[in-house]
Image (spheres, rainbow, N blue to C red):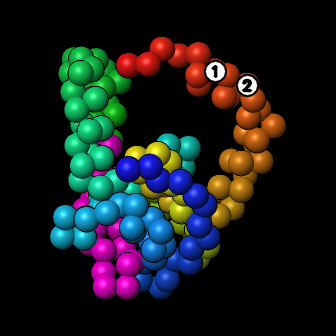
Amino acid sequence: MLLTGTFSRAVDEKQRIAIPKPLRETLGGLAKGILYVTPGTDGSLAIYTEDALARLAERLAYASPNGQDVRAFSRLFYARAQAVELDAQGRVRIPPELVQLAGLNKEAVLIGVQDHLELWDRLRWEQYVAGKQQQYDEIAESAFEKPSP
């Protein structure tokens, strides 16, 4: 599964966002229409299928459970991760505490990031892109210099 693209989304009064049809199709047969909304990085939220979340958990399991960062990340991540159900209109309701964590307002951006989606407040996403775009080449070089796992 390869998730890509940038989609402007409205956050309605019930804190729901619509997952665009191309992304729903790429996500494939969602088990009972369940996705997991978790804290993301850089002020975003991450949205995973159960399989993608399980793969992340496997990678984390290889890290030392005695490592302070591993313990802290696990607590902060899993304690706030929540299962959400995709409704008949292709929407998910974002839990209020995660809406607050990401500073979501009425305008959001949903982006595909390889194996998961990220949900950003529109203004925060625009600021992130503006701050990083100038360094794209350097970021790309650094990302591909690291050895594969």
Where's the C terminus, which quadrant? top left
The x, y position of residue 60, in whole percent, is 27, 29
Asked if 95 appears above or below 51 in the picture, the reply is: below
Task: Look at mark 2 in the image and give the residue it sits on.
Answer: 138
* Stretch of the chain drawn in magenta: 77-95
Q: Amino acid at mark 1?
A: Ser
Residue 75 sits in quarter: top left
Percent from the top left, x then y, of residue 62? 24, 21
Q: Which residue is mark 1?
A: 142
The reply to whether residue 79 is in sight is: no
Q: Are marks 2 and 1 in contact (CB under 8 Å)?
A: yes
Instruction: Pick the residue in front: 118 or 88.
Output: 88
Residue at the (38%, 78%) spot, across then down: 90
The image shows residue 36 at horizontal and vertical percentages of 30, 58
Q: How many marks?
A: 2
Q: Is residue 82 left or right of residue 106?
A: left
For badge 2, the amino acid type reads Glu
Task: Give me the C-alpha separation between circle 2 and circle 1.
Answer: 6 Å
- Residue drawn at x 24%, y 53% is 50
Q: Foreground: 124 or 114?
A: 114
From this view, report whether residue 29 is shown above or below residue 77.
below
Q: Secondary structure at mark 1?
A: helix
Q: Is residue 35 left or right of residue 2?
A: left
Which of the labelled discs sits on residue 39, or is there none?
Answer: none
For the point 35% across and 24% down, the residue is 69
